[in-house]
Amino acid sequence: MKKMPKLIDMMSQLIATPSVSSAHANIDLSNEPVIDRLANWLDGAGFSVRKQPVSEQKYNMIATIGGGSNGLVLSGHSDTVPCDEALWQSDPFTLSERDGLLYGLGSCDMKSFLAMAIQASTAFDFAKAAHPLTIVATADEETTMAGARLLAEDENPLGKFCVIGEPTDLTPIREHKGIIMEAIKFNGQSGHSSNPALGHSALEGMHEFIQALMEYRTRLQQQFHNSAFEVAEPTLNLGHIHGGDNPNRICGECELHIDLRFLPGMQIAELRDEIRQLARRVASRRELDVSFIALLNGVPAMHTGSDSDLNEFLQQVTQRQSQSVAFGTEAPFYNAMGTETIVIGPGSINQAHQPDEFLPVAQIEPTINLLKNLIQRYCFT
């Protein structure tokens, strides 16, 4: 068995290995170097390691140790968001400590968790395990969630219980909202603005559609409510609009981008269909063509029961009630496989996706102790 690097060295090496995931191809990077580092460490620690191709230059890593079945999964994504280095006080790809905080891109979101999961696993003799431990690193969580989607498509659970180490300040999260991002584009007929009969205004059609969307949002918020969330209703944000080219031309095309955050129990396909039907009705009335692009295929809402064994155990260990959050994770894809899933990890979501992202040093030891408790409970009993 190879000698494992120290925890801080693993964290430093992961952060020093860029793995930006972006919808813009010019800045999108392969995550393979990160996967290879993790695989090398875990192989040396006695894990059986599988490197799963997700797409060109993108991979999942699935590493398992211990016999039996129905074990524990510790999961994290291997990618990061892009960053503007000019806005950082230090190199985002160099782990640096200042005033008890560890700065670096991926320090809390969420490369450090993967290093901690490996570190926690070294405390056990898995020849004596009743159930296996599986450590998973996924691809492209920050954009398409393609890695987690592929795991779910395989339909073979990797374990009975799963903890995803997103930054939650070590508070268990058992619910989160789902996400749809959609582009809606109207195409009409341009013409001279002096005579509206010469064209069909895509911009006026979009104005009518936006009014219909606002009414639709109100109906959703009247129909669906969950007081466990800070924002207890679904939200629908009009995030981007562009149309036309000159004030003296009837607008020939107009495009709107929206973001819908929905509650557990609401379904992606149904919501997307309702929105598209609203647009089609407007297009028909105004003699416009309409087209749609799913900017995000959709992340389902997450719900793990409050009475689940994993939720109750984590509440007991942390002495914190589980919570509900608005941001999305890979948890619903694990739940779809029949794996009981809770999101809990070090660091705060408030530091994620920000310049000078950091992880408090004070949360490292409690995180490793928490992971050891999980491994003991779900792999050795």
Image: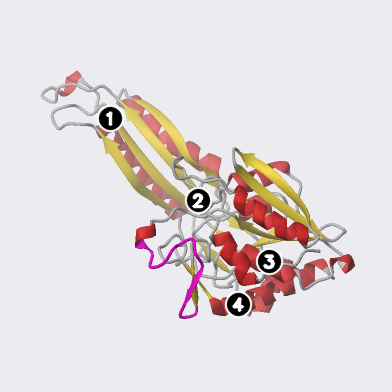
Q: Is residue 230 above or below residue 295?
A: below
**Disc nearest the viewer among 4 and 2:** 2
Mark 3–mark 2 Cα distance, whole angstroms, equals 22 Å
**Disc nearest the viewer among 3 and 4:** 3
Query: Helix, strand, or loop for circle 4?
Result: loop
Instruction: Please name the amino acid that badge 1 sits on.
Output: Ala
Instruction: Please name the amino acid that badge 4 sits on.
Output: Arg
Q: Earlier in the sequence, mark 4 or mark 1?
A: 1
Query: Helix, strand, or loop for circle 2?
Result: loop
Mark 4–mark 1 Cα distance, whole angstroms, equals 52 Å
Identified at 37% across, 50% down, the residue is 237
Mark 3–mark 1 Cα distance, whole angstroms, equals 53 Å
What residue span does the magenta drawing correspond to? 87-100
Quarter of the C terminus within the rendering: bottom right
The answer to whether mark 3 and mark 4 are in CB contact below 8 A is no
| x and y percentages locating residue 377 in the rendered image | 78, 71
Q: Earlier in the sequence, mark 3 or mark 4?
A: 3
Query: Helix, strand, or loop for circle 3?
Result: helix
Residue 202 is tagged as: 1
Instruction: Please name the amino acid that badge 3 sits on.
Output: Ala
Quarter of the N terminus within the rendering: bottom right
Residue linked to disc 3: 117
Q: Earlier in the sequence, mark 4 or mark 2?
A: 2
The answer to whether mark 1 and mark 2 are in CB contact below 8 A is no
The answer to whether mark 4 and mark 2 are in CB contact below 8 A is no
Residue 20 is tagged as: 2
